[in-house]
Amino acid sequence: MNAFTMTLTSTEKREEAKDKIAVLQRQEATTYRRPLPSFGSDKHWRQSIVEWMYDIVDSASMQRDVVAVASYYLDATSVSTREEYQLCAMTALQLAMKLYCSSSMSWSSLVRLSRGAFNEDDIRVMENRILESLKWRVHPPTANCFLREYLQLLPESVDTNSLYRLEQISRFVTEFASCLNSFCQYQPSHLAFAGMCVAMQRMEVGMVTNIHECIEAHTGMNFDAITTLWTELQQSLAHNVSLHELQVSMAALCSPVPRDTVSPLVIKPVLQFGRSPRQVSC
């Protein structure tokens, strides 16, 4: 069943989620240990590149998860100039699309996108370079991978609307964090947990302690391990205009309604914004 149908978890689903989380945690600690950005002492350069990736994915109506994968490829590949970094970003995004989406951009489309700055040979060479840097390990666990499983662990007492709002705001926070250099040092499992904590605080969920305890009991993590990360996320998001818009929209869309009216699943397409939700507005 699709993880985003927001069906409350059964015991079987919870056990399956626990097993998946354990595997993902092993992967992030070993095979897919998060690389720090190889280029970009100018933190705004990487931020601009990752936000550009989100714009491309949104314009092509593809799943946003591919950006987290593409940024992992980008950070893992050593480059020395801005031109190489731009080429690496384009190629990393195209590679992630090929692996994770039903459709992708062709190399000729990338050449046009670069406005002639690169040719197909440049892209072909860079793709091989990325794959060699990754040692052909191209399926890194992302914060959203963990978030999907964490949502399966929550108590059944969490109502559907709250679960839906929690997912949407948590995804926003993890996507926001993926743009900023300062959060590259943190493991995806911690980013997902901290993102949920930020979302719960913003939502003023009345059962925060119960949810914390539930995640901690099933994953082996504890809130103390992410306190610094949680604080940094709060500070970075303090003046984010897009997050405020998302909160207002979600509160309106998920307000109590008669049972025979539209469900949260039907109103998802209404969530459209004039600016990128990841855009930093500090």
Image (spheres, grey):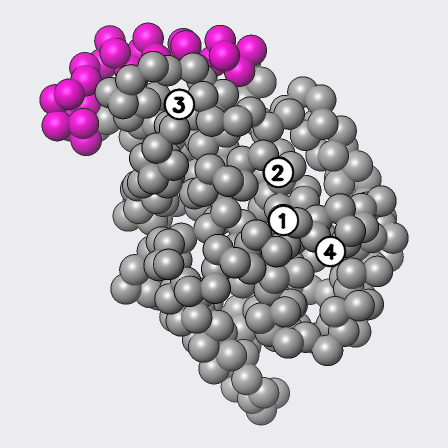
Tell me how far mark 3 sits from mark 1, CA to CA: 23 Å
Magenta segment? 111-135
Image quadrant where one finds the C terminus: bottom left
Where does residue 265 sit, x and y in percent of width and height?
Answer: 53, 69
Give the labeled residue for mark 2.
186
Closer to the eye: label 1 or 4: 1
Give the labeled residue for mark 1.
229
Tell me how far mark 1 sits from mark 4, CA to CA: 23 Å
Q: Is residue 123 magenta?
A: yes
Q: In this rendering, would 272 be left or right of 83?
A: right
Give the labeled residue for mark 4.
152
Marks 4 and 3, the one that precedes in the sequence: 3
Q: Which mark is residue 6?
A: none
Q: Secondary structure at mark 4?
A: helix
- When the figure is inspected, residue 141 is found, relative to residue 148, above or below; the finding is above
Q: Is residue 125 magenta?
A: yes
Tell me how far mark 4 sits from mark 2, CA to CA: 22 Å
- Quarter of the figure with residue 108: top left
Tell me how far mark 2 sits from mark 1, CA to CA: 8 Å
Mark 2: which amino acid?
A: Tyr
- When the figure is inspected, residue 63 is found, relative to residue 235, above or below; the finding is above
Mark 3: which amino acid?
A: Phe
Mark 4: which amino acid?
A: Gln
Q: Predominant secondary structure in magenta?
A: helix
Marks 2 and 3, the one that precedes in the sequence: 3
Q: Secondary structure at mark 3?
A: loop
How crowded is the residue under tag 2: few (<14 C-alpha within 10 Å), some, or many (20+)?
some
The answer to whether any part of residue 269 appears in the image is: no
Q: Secondary structure at mark 1?
A: helix
Where does residue 20 sit, x and y in percent of width and height?
Answer: 75, 39
Callouts 1 and 4 close, C-beta under 8 Å: no
